[in-house]
Each structure stands twice: as structure tokens, then as C-alpha cells.
Image: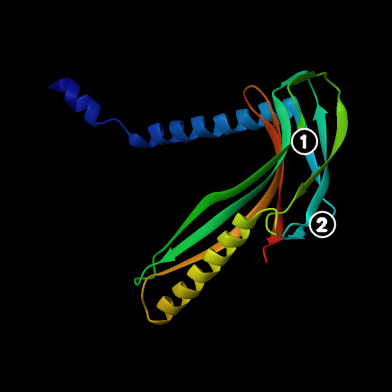
Amino acid sequence: YLPMLHLASVEPLPIIIGGVAIVVIAIIAYYVTRAMKGKVELELPKNGYNSGEEITGRVTLTAKKSLQLNRMYVALIGYEIVERRDSDGDRKTRRNEVYRNEVNILEAQSVPAGTNKAFDFTMNAPGGEATPSGDMAQKVAGAASAVAGALGALGMNTTTRRMEWKLEARADLPGVDIAKSQKVRVNLV
């Protein structure tokens, strides 16, 4: 009976503070580990592109220590943002990756410490004749948003959809990768 009484008197606040401290330390350790490996920089001449337009840029890899690179790539990633608002006004947002196009810059290799090397890349924005699925996705999203707007005007549940795009340069490494991303705009026509 006495041990049960002792357990009931345990203060939850130190346990919560300890848990938060562990999470904060883990996050700091992640970023320190990543920074110790080096960095990836991404340069783009502009932030907006039209369907099928060529996207060019430069990626710079700086290795602070010797790295065993699995590969280095640039990816154009499209996310469909789905926002649902019910008749009570509650809002829920989902983010789904619906498009990914990757271009390899380097294959698996060792990168010596002190390396600072730039690589140019080229890829095409989705849309146009080369990627008809991008056009279809945009048309479907536009139609769904129009229907959602009409339902919202009637006071019913509404769902809106929009696209967000980012370009990401990533050095795929054992353990913690090093990466840099930048938001871009892709106008699908």
C-alpha cells in the first residue's frame, strides 16, 4: 500500500520538462551534425517559371569534412495544399506531394574535406506537351476549387486546393543529409 502512495505523489512537471529538454537537445544535435558535414547552396536566376519552361541554376557543395556521398541531386517538388473548412468554421490543412522531378548532379563517390565545387543543372517545369499530367492535375484542382467556392457560398463544407512548389538541392549522405531548398512558382497553363 505504501509504494502506491509514493508513486501517486510523483510530480509530472519535472518529467515534462525533462522530455522537452531531450527533444530540444536532439534537434540541436541534428543541426550541429549537419553543419559539421558542410553545406549545400542553391542559386536560381529567377523564382517563377511557366509550363514546360527550362529551369536552370547552380548548386554549390562545400564539404567541411570528408563525405561519402550516395548521390547529389536537385528535385522540383509540387505539393497540393488541401484546406477543408466545415460549416462550424473549423479548418484542417493537408499537404500532399503530387509531383517530383529529380536530376542527378553527382553519383556515389567520396568527397574530400575542403571541397567547394559548383555544379550547373537544367530541368523543365511541368506542363506543356512534355508533361500532360501536370496540366490535368491543375485543371482538376481548379475545377474542385470552383465547386468548393460555390458550396461555401451556400454555407456548406468547403475544400480548396492550391499548388506550392519548391526546388531542393540535396547531398544524400549516410546519417544526416545536407540540403537547401527554395520556394518557386510554377504557372501551369
Q: Which residue is mark 1?
A: 40
Corner quadrant of residue 101:
top right
Q: Which is nearer the eye, 95 or 19?
A: 95
Foreground disc of the pair 1, 2: 2
**Residue 99 place in picture, x, y as percent:** 60, 49
Rendered position, 130 above or below 2: below
The image shows residue 131 at horizontal and vertical percentages of 66, 54
Q: Earlier in the sequence, mark 1 or mark 2?
A: 1
Residue shown at the point (87%, 31%) measured from the top left: 117
Q: Under tag 1, what secondary structure?
A: strand
**Label 2: few (<14), some or many (≥20) within 10 Å?**
few
Q: Amino acid at mark 1?
A: Val
Residue 142: give x, y in percent of width and height.
55, 69
Quarter-wise, where is residue 139 in the image?
bottom right
Residue lying at the far bottom in this picture: please name it: 154
- Inspect the image, locate mark 2, and give the three-letter code of the amino acid beneath it: Lys
How many other residues sit within 10 Å of disc 1, few (<14), some (14-19) or many (≥20)?
Answer: many
The disc at residue 46 is 2
| Residue 116 or residue 143, whichever sits in front | 143
